[in-house]
Amino acid sequence: MQSPQTISPQPAPPDWSGGRVGPWQSIKRRMFGGLMMVLPILITIWVVIWLYFALRHYVIDPLALNVLWLFRKGQPGVELPEWFEVYAAPPIAVLLALLVCYILGFFVQSRLRVWMDAILLRVPFISVVYDGVQKIFKTLDTQTQKKGPQRVVLVGFPHPGMKVPAFVTASCKDIETGRTLLCIYVPTTPVPTSGYFLLVPEDEVTELNWTPEQTLQTIISGGLTVPPDVRYFKPGEGASPVRSV
């Protein structure tokens, strides 16, 4: 009786591209990354400028003219003095803008926020970015409100000998060995809303001495704002530093 022959799987065809992407894909990726960094700044500047001139045109200047008209007992042709428009109106507008932002903070969990989310999440392109950023900052805010800081670790990825910073989001147990496994999110540069989800044994990660804010700033800036010190190796791991004689 002949033993059944085992059929070995056919080897996958070699990848001659070396994992590289075309020039047009690389250009689009870099343009999208740059847009994601510049867009929030431009929107913030536009909102601040719009709010400043709106407060000046519709609130501060009309109110000041009415007060001045009352003090002059209804004389016609009342105009605001130059010192008010140059020195007094700008700081008043800034203070009112801060007050408006403070008041809007009370509406974060209100129906107004739900209404805004419903509109933004229906816009095709904006919905992806808005939803991703909202989830990231909601997770970070939830973690910072808990007792103890959120865990930031270094994990070997994507190749042995390389480590990347990552956030620990949860943990679970392996049913065979009982080892603790960490649910890790590895954000990418410069858009941290896209990344990788990994399951890594807890004893294979290195605890990072950075705060979540420092880690996020380092990832977004591509290392330009990296903290001066980093715990890259575990205790007893790595070569000893060379001492100068």
Image (tube, rainbow, N blue to C red):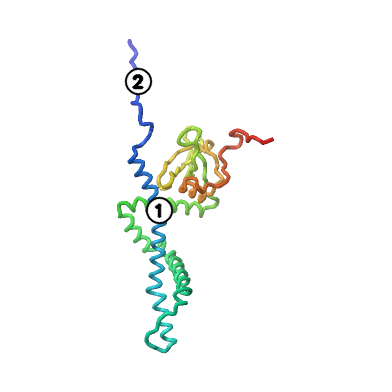
Crowdedness near tag 1: few (<14), some (14–19) or many (≥20) residues, C-alpha within 10 Å: few
Name which residue type carries label 2. Ser
- Above or below, 10 against 88 in this view is above
Name which residue type carries label 1. Val
Q: Mark 1 highlights which residue?
A: 38
Crowdedness near tag 2: few (<14), some (14–19) or many (≥20) residues, C-alpha within 10 Å: few
Spot occupied by residue 2 in the image (x, y as percentages of width and height)? 33, 11
Of helix, strand and loop, which one carries label 1? helix
Q: Who's the residue at 38% across and 66% down the image? A: 50
Q: Quadrant of residue 206?
A: top right
Q: Who's the residue at 34% across and 13% down the image? A: 3
- Above or below, 52 against 212 in this view is below
Give 168 or 21, whichever is nearer the viewer. 21
In three-dimensional space, the C-alpha distance between marks 1 and 2, rounded to whole angstroms, equals 52 Å
Q: Nearer the viewer, mark 1 or mark 2?
A: 1
Of helix, strand and loop, which one carries label 2? loop
Q: Mark 2 highlights which residue?
A: 8
Which quarter of the rendering shows the N terminus? top left
Spot occupied by residue 5 in the image (x, y as percentages of width and height)? 33, 16
